[in-house]
Image (spheres, rainbow, N blue to C red):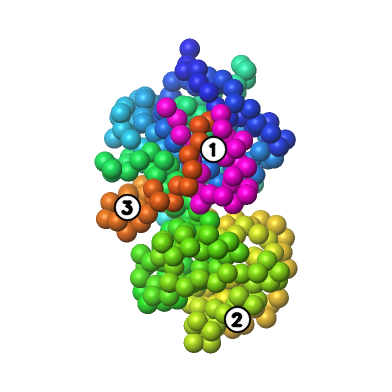
Amino acid sequence: MGILCKAAITNGKGSFEISEIEVNDPGDDEVLVKIKAAGLCHTDYDSLSWGKQLILGHEGSGIIVKTGKSVKELYPGDKVILSWATHCGHCFQCLKGNQHLCEVASPVTAHGNDFTPGHACPSGTTFKGQPVLRSFNLGTMAEYTLVKESAIVKNHSDKMSFPAASIISCGVMTGYGSVVNAAKVKRGSSVVVLGTGGVGLNVIQGAKIAKATKIIAIDVNKTRLDMAKAFGATHTILADKADTGLLNAAKQVKTLTEGRGADYAFECTAKPELGAAPLAMVRNAGTAVQVSGIEQEISIDMNLFEWDKTYINPLYGKCRPQIDFPTIIDLYEDGQILLEQMITRTYLLNELNKAFNDLLAGRNAKGVIVFD
């Protein structure tokens, strides 16, 4: 018999319940983790309506309980951070260094790029006697989870809290990696960040680490803009919700950048109507980056591409978990990246509905579910 524990499970039709699941012992290449904290983001809310039953959660940190017999260099008692960029290490994309695009093991890009988070990777978990999938093959909103070895990164920090570690899993990695790995922001450059929620704040932090000299934060929420300054923004623009495509905000950006536009602009709002907005913010030959994962069909005025502009749409900040997570931990240890300060509120698992309400109301930079 496996471990019986509490978890948040969605029916895929817009609702969820807190109920009991059973988690089996790990298979040969699997690791059993006691979850200590699980970060919360809009993707978790969206997963309530993916049309499939799932254990919720794709950001998490915890402690290893058991490992499979083929698992190397991971041991019971290790503090770990989970990553949904599970990878095989030998497919075309893995050999190209694109572990986040693995064609075999990724819950996002495997299976012909059919976006099916929680795709049928054996979960070793049952709910009401039937197998149940884990969101992004992690399902961190549970007291215990069973994951592949490639989803695990040791946390070598002695001072980092479990809630802080949990948000590295996706929000921190996506923002930081979009700057450092994907756009490769250059020292002395100018950067615009559209939307200063959890991901946007980490784009700001990534730009600061990359030594950008001008970091312009844009949001409709003044409180968030004040937080953006604390995380490294040098300038802020309070946008008007009626500003279609943020074209008026773009004029202010040009005023701040010698009339030509920024070198880089990052879209972090997840609003389809702003999908083209970063193109209006960058100079000729500048780079626009779509960070938030907009997947809807949108229309783009091709005049925004003039001239020689580049628009990229990176996944998960081009994450290489075993390389990038230790780097982020080191930056935290050196005081170069803030994590604890990003967590606005923590919640118990039975307070998940309140956590979702706060998320949708924009009350948090980052909310985290904590476990005893």
The amino acid type found where label 2 is placed reads Lys
The front one of 256 and 323 is 256
Q: Residues within 10 Å of mark 3 (few under 14, many from 20)?
A: some
Q: What residue is rendered at 33% in x and 35% in y? A: 79
Which label's residue is closer to the chain start, 2 or 1? 1
The front one of 100 and 273 is 273
Residue ID for mark 1: 57
Relative to 301, is 68 on the left or the right?
left
Which label's residue is closer to the chain start, 1 or 3? 1
Measured as percent of width and height from the top left, residue 236 is found at: 50, 71
Whole-number angstrom distance, CA of label 1 to CA of label 3: 24 Å
Label 3: state its secondary structure.
helix
Start-end of magenta stretch: 350-372
The amino acid type found where label 3 is placed reads Tyr
Which label's residue is closer to the chain start, 2 or 3? 2
Q: What residue is rendered at 43% in x and 24% in y? A: 26
Q: What residue is rendered at 50% in x and 17% in y? A: 4
**In the picture shown, does residue 33 fall above or below 130?**
below
The amino acid type found where label 1 is placed reads Gly
Looking at the image, the residue that sits furthest to the top is 1
**In the picture shown, does residue 22 fall above or below 11?**
above
Instruction: Locate residue 32: give its quadrant.
Output: top left
Residue ID for mark 2: 251
Q: What residue is rendered at 72% in x and 60% in y? A: 297
Whole-number angstrom distance, CA of label 2 to CA of label 1: 39 Å
Instruction: Locate residue 354: give its quadrant.
Output: top right
Label 2: state its secondary structure.
helix
**In the picture shown, does residue 253 fall above or below 231?**
below
Q: Is residue 233 visible?
A: yes
Whole-number angstrom distance, CA of label 2 to CA of label 3: 35 Å
Check the picture and name the quadrant holding the C terminus.
top left
Q: Residue 332, labelled with which disc?
A: 3
